[in-house]
């Protein structure tokens, strides 16, 4: 009877000791499985330079955890070309679709937007057609046209010709009656771009 009564107690004490030793291991495993030991640092941009430029300009971004960047945009334009130099530096090319605004970087399920804006300078690439009489509907192609405030032809006075901003890469303009043969100018964001010459015909 003494043997039968003490054996179960011994087994109970052994199981209790085993449970106390396994619990910390199980807790650590569960914590790791939930990502508790793999917290992801947020992407941060501390600075960038230059602060303005044409489409095609290379901009250097400095910050932390930039090695995980998966998407970069300048205003509303996504950058398709960028090089991760290190975890603290990226060089990105301003896309033709860029608009003046903050730079945004995505990474580690985190989105970081700079408090400062990058200014996209306007640039005129082409005129279609390149000549015509007053009243001609002209298509100006280029970049940095978002927010354009003025389109002028040589010799024009006042506010310039009537125009419509189709997007960052195109402006449609009606050649004014006082226009003359010469370069076309587009003003956007306080910056003016001078493009190819438009030839006024009778």
Image (tube, helix red, strand yellow):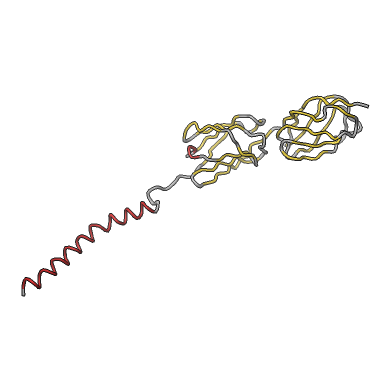
Figure quadrant of the N terminus: bottom left
172 on left or right of 13: right
Most extreme residue toward the left is: 2
> How many dots with numbers?
0
Quarter of the figure with residue 145: top right
Give the left or right position of residue 158, taking residue 109 as reference.
right
Q: Residue furthest right?
A: 202
Percent position of residue 97, x then y:
67, 37
* Residue found at x 73% / y 40%: 167
Q: Residue at x 55, y 34 (%)?
A: 61
Q: Quadrant of residue 99?
A: top right
The image quarter containing residue 48 is top right
Task: Please state the horizontal and vertical placement of residue 135, each as a whole percent of the image.
Answer: 90, 34
Which quadrant is the C terminus positioned in? top right
Q: Residue at x 20, y 64 (%)?
A: 16
Q: In the rendering, at what x and y percent does residue 149 appear? A: 78, 38
Front residue (pair 107, 139):
139
Q: Position of residue 173 (x, y in %)?
A: 83, 36
């Amino acid at each position: 009877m003494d043997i039968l009564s003490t054996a179960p107690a011994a087994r109970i004490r052994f199981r209790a000791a085993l449970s106390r030793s396994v619990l910390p291991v199980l807790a650590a495993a569960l914590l790791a499985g939930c990502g508790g030991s793999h917290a992801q640092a947020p992407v941060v941009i501390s600075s960038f330079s230059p602060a303005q430029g044409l489409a095609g300009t290379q901009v250097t971004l400095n910050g932390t955890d930039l090695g995980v960047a998966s998407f970069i945009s300048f205003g509303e334009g996504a950058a398709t070309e960028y090089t991760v130099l290190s975890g603290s530096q990226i060089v990105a090319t301003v896309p033709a679709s860029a608009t003046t605004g903050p730079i945004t970087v995505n990474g580690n399920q985190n989105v970081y937007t700079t408090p400062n804006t990058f200014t996209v300078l306007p640039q005129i690439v082409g005129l279609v057609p390149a000549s015509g009489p007053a009243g001609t509907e002209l298509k100006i192609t280029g970049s940095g046209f978002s927010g354009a405030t003025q389109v002028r032809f040589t010799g024009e006075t006042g506010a310039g010709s009537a125009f419509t901003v189709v997007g960052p890469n195109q402006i449609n303009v009606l050649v004014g009656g006082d226009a003359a043969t010469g370069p076309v100018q587009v003003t956007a964001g306080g910056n003016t771009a001078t493009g190819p010459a438009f030839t006024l015909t009778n």
